[in-house]
Image: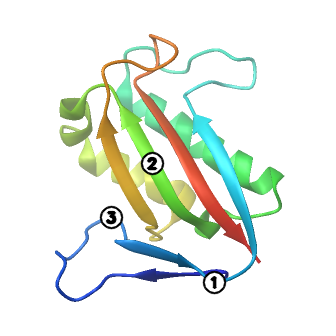
Amino acid sequence: MGFELINPVGLEKPVGYAHVAKITGGTIVHVAGQAPFDERGQVVGKDDFVAQFRQVVRNLKTAIEAAGGRPDQYAALTIYITNLEAYWNNTKILGSAYREVFGKYFPAITLVEVKRLYNPDCLIEVSGIAVID
């Protein structure tokens, strides 16, 4: 693997993410923010945070596979959401949807609540950095 995930002593124990992704080799791939669009450009799950999350993780899988990689080669993900309450109220089902694509693999992840995304019907967008060996 072209990177190492590190959880240093002295930092809180991470749940569902790693603190550090140290890139050591391979090809670095930047994946643009993936919003809940299907292949026709239509928003999936308008007003449904869980449906949008499912679509986004599928889009992340499609994007990395197009570059010759796999979901477990993402070193870092940045998650932008418009409603933190929707995230906290659905953590179990979101975790299940995440594991459908990523398994029990958790890269360095940052979660940010934002006022609005590019398309006002989108509740979530996720960008990533992957390392393909």
Marks 3/1: CA–CA distance:
22 Å
For label 3, the crowd category at 10 Å Cα-Cα, with few meaning under 14, some 14 to 19 and many 20 or more, is few
Pinpoint residue 43: horizontal percent, then vertical percent.
Answer: 57, 17
> On the picture, is 83 further left or further right than 124?
left
Pinpoint residue 10: horizontal percent, then vertical percent.
Answer: 17, 85
Q: Name the residue under label 3.
A: 16
Residue that appears at 32% across and 27% down? 114
> On the picture, is 21 further left or further right than 110?
right
Residue 24: mark in rendering:
1
Tell me which label, 2 or 1, sits earlier in the chain. 1
Tell me which label, 3 or 1, sits earlier in the chain. 3
Mark 3 lies on a secondary structure that is loop
Pinpoint residue 5: horizontal percent, then vertical percent.
Answer: 46, 80
The quarter of the picture where the C terminus appears is: bottom right
CB contact under 8 Å: marks 2 and 1: no
Marks 2/3: CA–CA distance:
13 Å
Residue type at mark 3: give it.
Gly
The quarter of the picture where the N terminus appears is: bottom right
